[in-house]
Image (cartoon, helix red, strand yellow):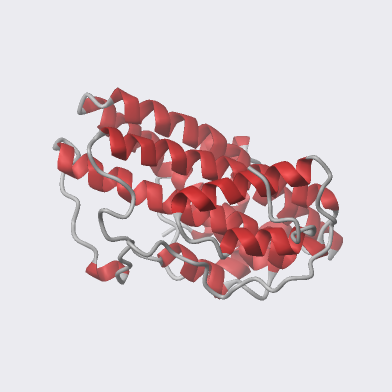
């Protein structure tokens, strides 16, 4: 689990993850980059352009969100596989989102920002590995079903503004996972699938830390610019997020992550 010898900067390492398409290789790349940074083998330089769109697995069919087949009730194994596949795809894209955040915007922040988001990227790789292994235990695999690239649309929309990226990806999209995943766990466990339930419980615990990372750095950056963090967040969400923030909210988990109600309640529909 080592990087090619010519990759010796954070920027080049992040681009390497993004341009690695196949799941096993992307997992290895993400883990290798996080480890290389932790061991001090990467210079804190951002000398590589991040791609507009990451490489995607050859076998994965991407459809527009409105053309995705309905999954049906979670009681059947087929529907559970479809749900796990959708979650695995979210985690696969989340690997790219974490390393794109570092490679695209890390130069605007202290090295502690890279520290934190490298850990997030490694977490996302681990989450994907757990879900893909679960799919294989159930006789399927990642890429067996179509997926959509709506998550990466958020990256495109916020490619020019670090604060917008933090507001939309960790503080809207990942915060939404805090709201809905506990109910998803209940549905899997109600169908007798306690293995997947345990995986999702692990993921939601990690997501609290990810939302906290986004919120913490958003506050750091807005404070540095003399901006009111909740007001600026609301402006950015209205400008860059295509949709609305829908209750009910998991206020307790959000509060643990530092994402207090003064950020999001005014945006609720």
Tell me where residue 29 appears, x and y as whole percent: 60, 51
Q: Nearer the viewer, residue 235 or 51?
A: 51
Tell me where residue 91 appears, x and y as whole percent: 46, 49
Residue 259 can be seen in this image: no
Q: Residue at x 40, y 45 (%)?
A: 248
Number of marks present in the image shown: 0
Q: Residue at x 58, y 62 (%)?
A: 18
Q: Residue at x 54, y 61 (%)?
A: 20
Q: Taking 78 as reference, is 187 left or right?
A: right
Residue 155: image quadrant is: bottom right
Tell me where residue 234 appears, x and y as whole percent: 60, 64
Q: Nearer the viewer, residue 90 or 205?
A: 90
Up the image or down, 177 lies above or below 191; here it is below
Residue 11 can be seen in this image: yes
Up the image or down, 7 lies above or below 117; here it is below
Residue 59: image quadrant is: bottom left
Quadrant housing the C terminus:
bottom left
Q: Taking 130 as reference, is 66 left or right?
A: left
Q: Nearer the viewer, residue 245 or 24?
A: 24
Up the image or down, 54 lies above or below 80; here it is below
Quadrant housing the N terminus:
top right
Up the image or down, 108 lies above or below 28; here it is below
Q: Taking 25 as reference, is 210 left or right?
A: right
Q: Nearer the viewer, residue 92 or 245?
A: 92
Tell me where residue 190 appears, x and y as whole percent: 23, 26
């Amino acid at each position: 689990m080592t990087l090619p010898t010519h990759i010796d900067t954070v920027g080049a390492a992040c681009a390497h993850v993004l341009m690695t398409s196949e799941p096993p290789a992307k997992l290895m790349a993400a883990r290798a980059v996080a480890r290389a940074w932790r061991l001090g083998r990467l210079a804190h330089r951002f000398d590589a352009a991040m791609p507009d769109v990451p490489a995607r697995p050859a076998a994965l069919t991407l459809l527009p969100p409105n053309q995705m087949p309905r999954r049906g009730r979670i009681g059947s194994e087929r529907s559970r596989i479809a749900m796990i596949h959708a979650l695995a795809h979210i985690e696969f894209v989340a690997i790219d989102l974490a390393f794109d955040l570092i490679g695209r915007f890390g130069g605007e922040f202290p090295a502690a920002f890279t520290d934190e988001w490298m850990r997030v990227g490694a977490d996302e790789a681990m989450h994907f590995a757990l879900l893909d292994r679960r799919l294989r235990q159930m006789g399927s695999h990642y890429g067996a079903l179509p997926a959509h690239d709506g998550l990466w649309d958020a990256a495109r929309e916020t490619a020019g503004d670090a604060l917008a990226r933090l507001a939309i990806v960790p503080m809207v999209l990942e915060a939404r996972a805090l709201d809905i995943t506990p109910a998803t766990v209940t549905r899997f466990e109600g169908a007798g699938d306690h293995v997947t339930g345990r995986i999702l419980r692990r993921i939601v615990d990690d997501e609290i830390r990810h939302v906290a990372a986004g919120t913490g750095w958003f506050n750091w950056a807005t404070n540095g610019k003399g901006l009111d963090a909740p007001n600026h967040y609301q402006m950015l969400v209205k400008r860059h997020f295509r949709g609305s923030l829908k209750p009910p909210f998991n206020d307790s988990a959000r509060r643990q992550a530092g994402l207090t109600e003064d950020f999001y309640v005014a945006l609720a529909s």
